Amino acid sequence: MTALIILLCVLLISIVLVQIGKVTELTAQIKGEREVLRDNSKWNGWLSLVFMVVFLVSVCISAWEYKNEMMGYGPHKAASAHGGALDDMFHITLVLTGIVFVICHIALFWFAYKYRWQEGRKAQFIAHDNRLELIWTAVPAVVMTILVVRGLNAWNTVMADINPNEDYIEIEATGQQFNWIIRYPGPDGKLGTRNFKLTTANNQLGMDFTDPKTWDDVIPGQELYLPVGKKVRVRITAKDVLHNFYLPHFRVKMDAVPGMPTYFIFTPVKTTAEYRNELRKYDDFNKPNDAADPTGPKRWEKFEYELACAELCGKGHYSMKRILKIVSQEEFDAWYKTQESFYLTQIRDKDDDPNKGKVLDMEVRQRAQEFSDNMKKAVESADPADKTLTLNHINFESGSATLTANSRYELDNLVTGLNAYSGITIEVAGHTDNTGDPSANLALSGARAAAVVKYLTDRGISAGRLRPKGYGDTRPLVANDTEENRAKNRRTEFTILGTSNPL
């Protein structure tokens, strides 16, 4: 139906135009072609003047009306250190081209009026004018030189890469239909390597988990955070089609091209809260954010920095919007501590983990810190329930009291703790599930507790401070009704029995 209506409209317009042509021909025949030509020239001249005035006034009014919605004018000042240089460059370009636009616009329609056809007037033929040639050659050349030099200077400033000794944070943005995958470095401050051949459903970035730098890398949720006043280097790439990494308020815009990594460097200078406070000075931003809720939040209160894709990358292009919060360094650090390693939470010990069965250096450090914190709490606490700690990373060969090789890391943490708190005595307790004969389970748990004690004494811990004890299946943590629960009941614990002089 819509197509039919459009077709009928086009047909109707064509008929009207044909009829206007016929009326014009008929008028010329009645009045005489010369008189019609004179009338048409007069009206075209005057209408050119009217259009010249109306159009220039409309341009000025619309520019003033919408200046607050345009970047670089009104409230939308650049929120990055380099943004001012780009805005200045565009301002100068606008002024210079604006002058040319006004002059050319006036000249075009004034000449259309002034040199309209009149009876008895003859055109003057000018073969050449050196002065005129010089003006319209030299002036554009000088203006272009100024614009190009300033542009190159701005480009070299904005696109300069990071110096090795600079304090900065590097993140990675990968565009795909239809989402941005943002990767932050872990505590090591370095982004791990990638290989597109390693891309899977679980590893969409193709991160190479044989590289230790990838182990602590973070892929956060929808909201992104960056600290104010700190230089940010963004690695930019794409997985499928051309995207564009666009942070309009920071004057950051760079194509994300499959197979050709790019980058952009910027320093945020205004937090989200500071930008909101600037917006609240403008009447437009003190209107309700939702017109249907006049008493609700104002526009400035709901403002957020946005990451968008500035390429039409497909039907779902609109969904690539991400919220970016610029906060203080303290707020960023607090948020950053809540982020978990992608590798440790999504890949570790699964079938596609190349390090399955190995204990990683970072895990050794994390476990050591966690054990130290828990033992300190146990020593200092007056609650008996806090005095018992499970040795989560101690394992034995199936059905025996032989410690696995990886158990040494946890046992070494216990050795460190006992040396730090030299006045405590502990009970080392072994527990099993209810599978098999209860008496055999009791014997096995006792043998496992003894194996732990032997490891400790071999490393200098006095045997008088250690009490091995096997409980078999008599003290389950949970019901032995599933394999998962039985695994929880198969455990080794230690309980602090006394403390004479904790450090």
Image: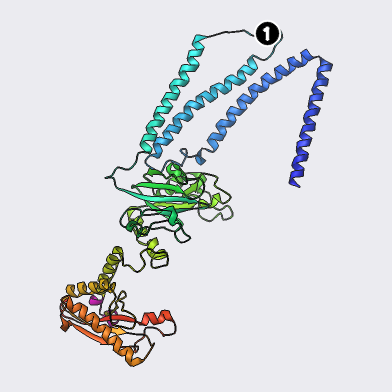
* Horizontal and vertical percent position of residue 334: 34, 59
Please say if 160 is above or below 31. Answer: below
Decide whether the magenta segment is chiefly helix, strand or loop: helix
Q: Residue at x 33, y 53 (%)?
A: 190
> Looking at this view, is 13 or 442 the one in front?
442
* Horizontal and vertical percent position of residue 28: 81, 17
Please say if 114 is above or below 147. Answer: above
Please check the rendered image and state whether residue 252 is part of the magenta-colored stretch, yes or no.
no
Magenta residue span: 378-386
**The C terminus lies in which quarter of the figure?**
bottom left
Q: Residue at x 35, y 69 (%)?
A: 357
Q: Residue at x 50, y 27 (%)?
A: 97
Look at the image and tell me whether residue 304 can be seen. no
Q: Secondary structure at mark 1?
A: loop
Please check the rendered image and state whether residue 380 is part of the magenta-colored stretch, yes or no.
yes
Residue topped by disc 1:
121
Look at the image and tell me whether residue 359 can be seen. yes
Looking at the image, how many numbered discs can be counted on the residues? 1
> Looking at this view, is 272 or 395 the one in front?
395
Amino acid bearing label 1: Arg
* Horizontal and vertical percent position of residue 255: 47, 43
Residue neighbourhood size for the residue with mark 1, other residues' Cα within 10 Å, grouped as few (<14), some (14–19), many (≥20): few
Left/right of residue 416 with respect to residue 281 in the rendered view: left
